[in-house]
Amino acid sequence: MKPEVLSPAGNLEKLKFAVDFGADAVYLGGKLFNLRAKAGNFTLEEMEEGINYAHEKGAKVYITLNAFARNDDFKGIERFIDEVKPLKPDAFIVSDLGVLKTVRERAPEIEVHISTQANTTNYRAVEVYRELGAKRVVLARELSIEEIREIKEKVPEVELEVFVHGAMCMAYSGRCLLSNYLSYRESNKGACSQSCRWKYYLVEETRPGEFFPIEEDETGTYIFNSKDLCALPLLPQLIEAGVDSLKIEGRVKSSYYVAITTSVYKRAVKLIKEKGISAFKEELPTLLEELKKVSHRPYTLGFLKREEEILQHYETSSYIREFKFLGVFKGGKWQVRNKVRLEEEVELFLPNVKTFKAKVKGIKVERKGREERVREANPNQVALIEFDRELPLQENAILRRKEKA
Ligand code: SF4
């Protein structure tokens, strides 16, 4: 179903969560040459397992190869392409023209997508990438829906991918040296320390060590501190503008984040395509509520629709985390991720974005081949859990607990 929902896969587990929760495609990086040095990333064996898993369930896999290469990098890049090619990924995502040329030469049968790192902001650039053999362009986050629509009208044969959810840079995506200077971690090599979200002071040059606060409120300053993107309310317009792929950011985020965001965007696309915009609008408040249940900063529509909205977040630089992920239901049992206790109030989340509240009334775990009743189940245990009411349990249901504010 178009547009596809494209989810982040920071590691093998997250890939499986994304696919199980409805992603049409996932993107991931190898241990080298991608932009998420801290995302865990995949060994070749894991990549093979991930690609096979996704393909069996009808999902595509795109491999990021999007760091800006230096001369010395090409030997490694060539080796990487040669090793990954036989695993049959569906595309390589590149940002550097040299890398693009190398991929086209060494793996002409594999699609090339142009990364958002290439900062494509106009149809002329998209035409150039088409001529260079690209199948898809991931547009810069800075474009409006109108600009996206115009690009699609002018170059309809190139697929357009647009970020719809997740963290944003205060610079053109990744084109920023704050992290490089302040923590020697290069944002264009995937190692950004998100220095834009630190606190800053003013220092007069003849008074080193004297820090003048530049307070926007009593808790400090947030001059570079972006809100998170959430384009869910704009989905009908994005689809109408001809967007082919809706991208969720967050390869360093949790499996829980991947599951919830993927389910929500997939449900929204289904509603729009199968039942129409009014059905989508009716369910929108519930879907937005779900997106508040993953770790996030206050949300913004970003640059997609410019209103009198402030994109900076001026209250705090920390994340809002309201819910704790307790476990996932697989093969008739709960795989526990965080402690589950007897008598606690919990919430069940189903992949079709339905939720149910309940109380834990019994917990059994396996010990030495026998089932044993316990008062709490711990992370990494496999448990049977009884609730105070009948719940429509199904594969991949998620159990979570609302955290106290
Ligand atoms: S420091 Fe902030 S603006 Fe700079 S690359 Fe990192 S996330 Fe983007």
Image (tube, rainbow, N blue to C red):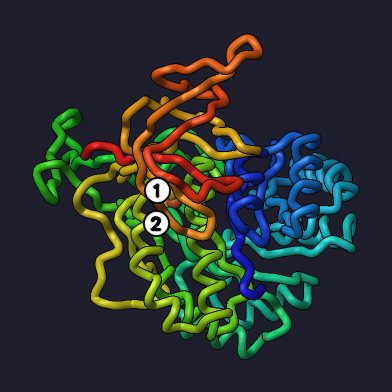
189 or 351: nearer the viewer: 351
Q: Dot 1 corresponds to which residue?
A: 294
Q: Residue at x 51, y 64 (%)?
A: 265
Q: Residue 304 in the image: x percent, y percent?
A: 42, 74
Q: Are marks 2 and 1 in contact (CB under 8 Å)?
A: yes
Q: Residue 104 in the image: x percent, y percent?
A: 84, 62
Q: Is residue 140 left or right of residue 215?
A: right
Q: Is residue 392 left or right of residue 344?
A: right
Quarter residue 112 falls in: bottom right
- What secondary structure is marked by label 2? helix
200 or 156: nearer the viewer: 156
Number of disc labels: 2
Q: Residue at x 61, y 37 (%)?
A: 332
Dot 2 alpha-carbon crowd within 10 angstroms: few under 14, some 14 to 19, many 20 or more: many
Q: Is residue 319 left or right of residue 102?
A: left
355 or 386: nearer the viewer: 386
Q: Residue at x 47, y 75 (%)?
A: 235
Against 387, residue 70 (above or below) is below
Quarter residue 367 falls in: top right
Q: Residue at x 86, y 47 (%)?
A: 87
